[in-house]
Image: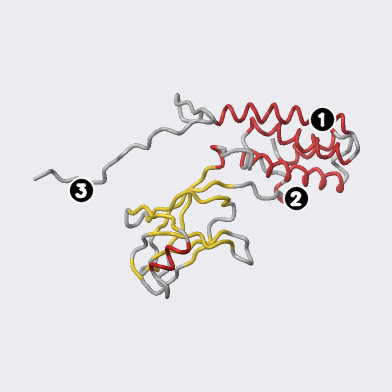
Amino acid sequence: MTLTTAIKITANRVGLLETNVSFKDRSRDYLNIIAKRIGTRAKWNWLHKATTFNTTADTQTYQLATDVLTPHSFTDQSNNQPLGIVGWDVLDLADPDRGETGDVDVVTIEGVDATTGRIVVRLYPIPSTSDDVIRYRYLAYIPDWTSSDDSTELDRWIPEWLQPALIFGATELYKQEKGDYEGALTDRAEYETGIKSALDINLNVQGNREWHRGRGGPVSPFWPQEGGLTAAG
């Protein structure tokens, strides 16, 4: 399903024609709102992502990808080194004047860039070489769709089994705006049904392993690094 199709269904369910630019834009606005609601409803497996950035010598701060909601972990891939995530106080104690250089050991989350709104991280020590690859995993969010996205398949951002819930959530909001509160309640119920099914799917994403709500996760496995173990004397 393309975004255009979702817009058409949303407008039509409210009794409006998507050919009207105002109705079309309004439908897209509501789809954007519900996409954010869905994205923050759970730690969806389809929103877990990984990417990289390259270091620049003597540069300590870096902006993460535009769709990063929460960073999970960092690894200095070039030096085969997992990087810890520490708070500001730890970094200030380790390097008050922020002048130490070398291979990166830890990362701190600085906040967001005032211009771009992207999350900024600080590396310690300051990288002494360029082009070291820092890989990171993160939980993403769905950025706002614009008219330039209308012909794009929604699968790019949200899986097929959740797309009906996206539409029912949008029509709920649109019907509330139009004063159709009974219709809005019906669409709300359909939205919740779709979300519940998706939450169940989200617990069964790794083959035959099953995850259960409200219980601790599995014990983390231990993999010794090459050369990390020595025989007792």
* Tag 2 near tag 3, CB within 8 Å: no
Q: Residue 64 appears at what percent x and percent y?
A: 53, 58
Mark found first going from the N terminus, 1 or 2: 2
| Residue sitting at x 72%, y 41% | 34
Foreground disc of the pair 2, 3:
3
What numbered label is drawn on residue 185? 1
Q: Give the quarter of the image for residue 91.
A: bottom left
- For residue 207, above or below residue 132: above
- Disc 3 + disc 1, Cβ < 8 Å: no
Q: Position of residue 201 (x, y in %)?
A: 57, 28
Q: Nearer the viewer, residue 154 or 102?
A: 102
> 213 or 32, which is in the foreground?
213
Report the residue at 40% width, 54% height from top. Answer: 84
Callout 2: SS: helix
Q: In the rendered structure, which amino acid carries the disc numbered 3?
A: Gly
Q: Looking at the rendering, in which quadrant would you find the N terminus? A: top right
Which residue is pictured at 50% across the width and 61% down the height? 121
The amino acid type found where label 1 is placed reads Leu
**Would you say 145 lies left or right of 184 here?**
left
Say which quarter of the image contains residue 10: top right
Name the residue tied to disc 3.
227
Q: Quadrant of the C terminus?
A: top left
Percent across and percent down for residue 200 are 58, 27
The alpha-carbon separation of the residues under discs 1 and 2 comes to: 29 Å
CA separation, marks 2 and 3? 55 Å
According to the image, label 2 marks what residue? 147
Foreground: 178 or 149?
A: 178
Say which element carries label 3: loop
Q: Is residue 56 left or right of residue 33?
A: left
Q: Secondary structure at mark 1?
A: helix
The amino acid beneath tag 2 is Ser
